[in-house]
Image (cartoon, rainbow, N blue to C red):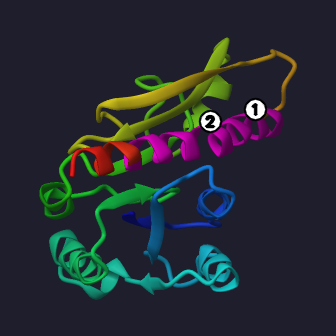
Amino acid sequence: MVKFAVFASGSGTNFENIIHNLETGNIQNAKCVTLIVDKAQAKVIDRAKRLGIAYHVVLPKEFADKEAYEQAVLEILKKDQVELIILAGYMRIITHVLLDAYPKRIINLHPAYLPEFPGKQSILDAYEAKVTYSGVTVHYIDEGIDTGEIIRQEKVMIDPSWSLETLEEHIHALEYQLFPEVINLVCKQIEERR
């Protein structure tokens, strides 16, 4: 059984989708042991309470720097014997503290077809660029912004008549399908390497 932690900063829809996929068996041989949240008022906290998932609110501003913040997070992860970190709407750059502790064990969901449209507002960027497609990418984290090795990605063909909201709906629907599949795959690979 692979113990993983989810990191989130916002509403937590992808977090809830991951837990749902654990419960239905679409993600196997894995357990979400904790949720790490970096914002005191994040809606994902309410989801964790409702779903019965342990969570820790760790506020970066309470630490001297990013490294000290991540060191505090790392202590929680060690205590919970976390083997894999899953970023689901976590809006922080990961530093060497976690990267060194979890080499190729931190995965991120990005709502664009990388390397196109990295960064925070990728759906809006794709929409405003009037491209014919965007998509969803799941990748390992490295020192850059959305530059890590791609695990899997799929395209969403964009109808020129779509509003931004319609594009967001299509991207999120694909996220909810693709992310659990990749998490299941990565957990299986971790188990096989033991």
Q: Is residue 81 magenta?
A: no
Q: Percent position (x, y) of residue 44?
A: 61, 73
Separation of marks 2 and 1 at Cα, in angstroms: 8 Å
Judge the density around disc 1: few (<14), some (14-19), many (≥20) Cα neighbours within 10 Å.
many
188 displayed left or right of 55: left
Please tell me the numbered disc located at residue 167: 1
Q: Residue furthest top?
A: 132
Q: Percent position (x, y) of residue 22?
A: 60, 60
The magenta span reads 165-187
Please tell me the numbered disc located at residue 123: 2
Q: Percent position (x, y) of residue 118?
A: 43, 34
Q: Is residue 177 magenta?
A: yes
Helix, strand or loop for the magenta stretch, by majority:
helix
| Amino acid type of the residue that numbered disc 1 sits on in the rendered structure | Leu
Q: Percent position (x, y) of residue 121?
A: 55, 42
2 and 1 marks in contact (CB < 8 Å): yes
Find residue 77 and report its image quarter: bottom left
Residue at figure coordinates x 83%, y 31% from the top left? 163
Image quarter of the N terminus = bottom left
Judge the density around disc 2: few (<14), some (14-19), many (≥20) Cα neighbours within 10 Å.
many
| Amino acid type of the residue that numbered disc 2 sits on in the rendered structure | Ile
